[in-house]
Image (tube, rainbow, N blue to C red):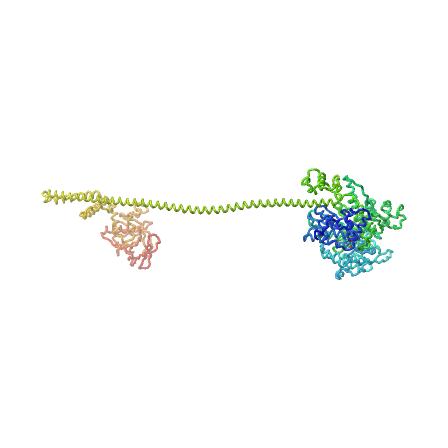
Amino acid sequence: MAKSDVKTSLLDNMIGVGDSVLLEPLTEDTFLENLKKRFDHSEIYTYIGSVVISVNPYRPLSIYTPTKVEEYRNRNFYELSPHIYALADEAYRSLRDQDKDQCILITGESGAGKTEASKLVMSYIAAVCGKGAEVNQVKEQLLQSNPVLEAFGNAKTVRNDNSSRFGKYMDIEFDFKGDPLGGVISNYLLEKSRVVKQPRGERNFHIFYQLLSGGSEDLLRQLKLEKGFNHYNYLGLDSAEVNGIDDAANFRTVKNAMQIVGFMDDELESVLEVVAAVLKLGNIDFKPESRVNGVDESRIKDKNELKEICELLGQDQAVLERAFSFRTVEAKQEKVSTTLNVAQAYYARDALAKNLYNRLFTWLVNRINESIKAQTKVRKKVMGVLDIYGFEIFENNSFEQFIINYCNEKLQQIFIELTLKEEQEEYIKEGIEWTHIEYFNNTIICELIENNINGILAMLDEECLRPGTVTDETFLEKLNQVCAVHERFESRMSKSSRFLNDTTLPHNCFRIQHYAGKVMYHVEGFVDKNNDLLYRDLSQAMWKTNHVLVKSLFPEGNPAKMSLKRPPTAGSQFRASVATLMKNLLTKNPNYIRCIKPNDQKAPHIFTEGLVRHQISYLGLMENVRVRRAGYAFKQLYEPCLERYKMLCSQTWPHWRQGARDGVEVLLTELQIPSEEYSYGRSKIFIRNPRTLFELEDQRKRRLEDLATLIQKIYRGWKCRTNFLLMKKSQIIISAWSKRHFQRKKYLRLKMVTLRIQSYIRGWKARKLLRELKHQKRCEQSATTIAAYWRGTQARRELKRLKEEARRKHAVAVIWAYWLGLKVRREYRKFFRANAGRKIYEFTIQRIMQKYFVDLKNKMPSMSPTEKTWPARPYLFLDSTHTELKRIFHLWRCKKYRDQFTDQKRATFEEKLEASELFKDKKALYTNSVQQPFQGDYLEISKNPKYQKLNGAVEEKILLADVVNKINRANGKGAPRIFLLTKSNFIIADQKSGQIKSTIPVMDITSISVSKQTDGLFAIHLKEGSTAAAKGDFLFTSDRLIEIITKLYRTIFLKTNQKIAVEINNEFLVQFNQDKVCVKFIQGTQKNGNLPACKRKNNRLLEVTVP
Ligand SMILES: Nc1ncnc2c1ncn2[C@@H]1O[C@H](COP(=O)(O)OP(=O)(O)O)[C@@H](O)[C@H]1O
Ligand SMILES: [Mg+2]
């Protein structure tokens, strides 16, 4: 829509007057006229201030399109022509922006359009509040709860084809942003009697028809239902089909809605099963059966229906059948079972059907609540929408109408309280000049009904609880007694009744003058309906089913939870819930929609003036307009008012330091608002005209925009500046760092270059210096060398000169000596001529010899015979003399040495000499013996007492005594023997005993044989034929072989003067007895020291192994 097309005031293109407050003159006629005019021009909404009057058009209008929604969105209430959207928008914005919980109260009689209005409000709010997948789902669920509840709770009545047969209050919950979070639905008293019976021209609840029309064949078969409404007793026949209602299509809508709301498939199935069961319950018929005792009993006519119901509900047929035939009364722990007659059985059947359906409905509401409840625990803002059944006057009004009308009475009371009474009272309280406007206050009617002591509901409860026979008639009687004098109560029964002659009032009725008109109530059924009794047998039977849903609907049927306490009556329950509702509504900011029904034909374009006039009257609309006109459209405490508008005045903005009232005064004066437009109350400012308020609001809005721009400007400036400063700071830091970096790089490069140049220069300088130093050194060296050479040359030249000089001098001297000699010889030649030469020679020789001997005497070597040195020969000619002298000196020296010897020592040396002659360089053993002195007697025979006897046996002087090994001739084994040598014998004695074994004269020894080796074996060969030689030659071994043989040799030489042969050979022969045995020495491994091992090999051979 182009901007220019947008309406800016409800006054634009106005038909009649949009706001009745502006009506001039204001009378009921003009008011009605105005409504009619507007209605005729399809303007169904008219304001009284902020209250919306809605006249039901009974036809679809094109004023609920999305463009309309956009048009009314965020606009001031009076800006556009009156619309329910304007009210919804106002309420929603107050909720969202001012944080005030709202409620929308929709009142009007049945068929006036309340339910439609509530749906319009909800759809508008759904359209304007937050968007997003989650929010949309919440919205969708909230909206879709409507078709479900309508299907089960609405029915066609004579007044309304889609009449709500229950009261509904829905709280929609929002978060702080205004996004919907969820909702809570409360329901009030379903008109359940409709389930079993409907007044003429009306229908049962929609769902039954929807199910039968829309259910598929499969579904119906499954639910054991037949198509056709006429099969079911509970469905009134006369108006089953309703023009303009497509039950089949609605059934699909309902199923779809249930899915969206979140019903599971099995839940839907269960619900339909219960619906089917209720429908079929109506078809159970009973027949009387007389008993012998005269008692009538009822029997079920056709058990097939019962069987199918039981199958549907998972019920035991016998249990249900019994529950329809007996009633158990429990009194003082006694159970009494009585049989039911036919009427009672029907009553039981209907009670069950009603209860089943009612409980199912309550369950549905709870189930929907479960789905739509807000998922978060955050603080919520709430908008309540109340759509309660409207005021009803039927031909035959019963308990339900009584309750419904009571509820409407209460709502009217709230309206009066808030719009008429309180407002006027407040003006007076605030000290505003005010002329009271009369209005009808319906408190008196409410009191008549709900008073705790003598109210009708209290009477009814009292009657229900009273022992004894209680009937509707006794209840009426009681009413007549208590209420007869009440100005709003009419009855013919009481004696003093003002209505004794009123024939329009039947005897079984009472009449109440409601705010909306007189209603006559038939007392029939009041007690029953208030009691709302379901035989315990039935609830217990129901609890026993396998059907989860049905079982949960009858918790009191659980024997474990059974209580004897009566449940609260329907009336008192309702009264309590209405009281709660009223309390709830009073906490919220109310928004009113007052619905008016233009005709009774439910037809468009018909405006029945009488009907409307009546509604205007009982709704108190005229009073409403009057109060509005005289009063003030808007009131507010000074503080919040100043707080809200203080930005409009330079004096109060931003801070006002004085009282709030003064502030508001300054504000309004400065804004140049005409003084008749407002009044100052004690604590509140009252603004007469909404337009003034809207002007203020507009100015505020503009100012807020300016302020927002200012804040934005300052914030942007601040933000930019902070950003700039930050960037500047960053830039400085970055440039500092980069400068540092580049300077550092440059510096390092310079440093490197400098260092390089420096090093080159230093190098160059150093090399130069080195060159110079080298040069200098070379110069010095050259100088030294030159000097040295020069000095050398000088020295050599000098030496040469000196040598030359010396040679010359020597030459001169020689020449001179020769010359002198020559001169002397020439002179003395005449004196030496004959022998002087010889004499000089002799003298010279003499001198030389003399000197030689003197020198020799001084240089004489030592006297040791082993000394070999001799002074060097001085003159060649003394060579032979010198050698001879050496020899003589040695001999002399030896002689001198020998002269020192004793005899014994001499003998010893002689022996050693002898040994040397015998063995030196012949036998290897000899070298060992050289340094061993020849002791001779090793056994000390003469001193050792052990050898005393032996010593005694030997007469001669013992030359040698030692222990030797005598080799056994036969096997070569050795045995120790004492070997003694005297001048003439050698004696062999036993080593231990000293017993002489044999004495052999030395003369019998012919020769001695030894080997060349280091062994000590020796053979003593004896003269053949001698006594000693009887056994043959001796073989001995001894370490002292050299001494023994030397001594033997010398002894024999001294005795016989013959030198015996000492054979030294590695193989020799010995004579053993008659045999000549060869003794052979072979080299072997060392076994027992130096002693050779002898082994007689055979007759001819004795092997000696020498180590
Ligand atoms: N604003 C409207 N526009 C068109 N038809 C309406 C409007 N309000 C009510 N109706 C018609 O009036 C009938 C009854 O309205 P409803 O809201 O059910 O009445 P109530 O709830 O007050 O008993 C609706 O079924 C509908 O056909
Ligand atoms: Mg309704």
Q: Nearer the viewer, residue 683 or 313?
A: 683
From the viewer's perspective, is 1082 left or right of 808? right
Quadrant assignment, res 354: bottom right
Q: Nearer the viewer, residue 1012 or 13?
A: 13
One can see residue 492 in this view: yes
User: Residue 826: where, in percent of width, then height?
Assistant: 11, 43
User: Residue 880: where, in percent of width, then height?
Assistant: 18, 48
From the viewer's perspective, is 120 left or right of 1105? right
List the single residue furthest toward the top.
Answer: 658
Note whether 711 is above or below 265 in the view shown. above
Q: Nearer the viewer, residue 317 or 1070?
A: 317
List the single residue furthest toward the bottom.
Answer: 217
State the quadrant of the C terminus.
bottom left
One can see residue 540 in this view: no
List the single residue furthest toward the right.
Answer: 501
Q: Nearer the viewer, residue 574 or 134?
A: 134
User: Residue 722: where, in percent of width, then height?
Assistant: 59, 44
Note whether 62 is above or below 673 in the view shown. below
Quadrant assignment, res 628: top right
User: Residue 779: where, in percent of width, then height?
Assistant: 31, 45
Marks counted in the figure total: 0
List the single residue furthest toward the front.
Answer: 4
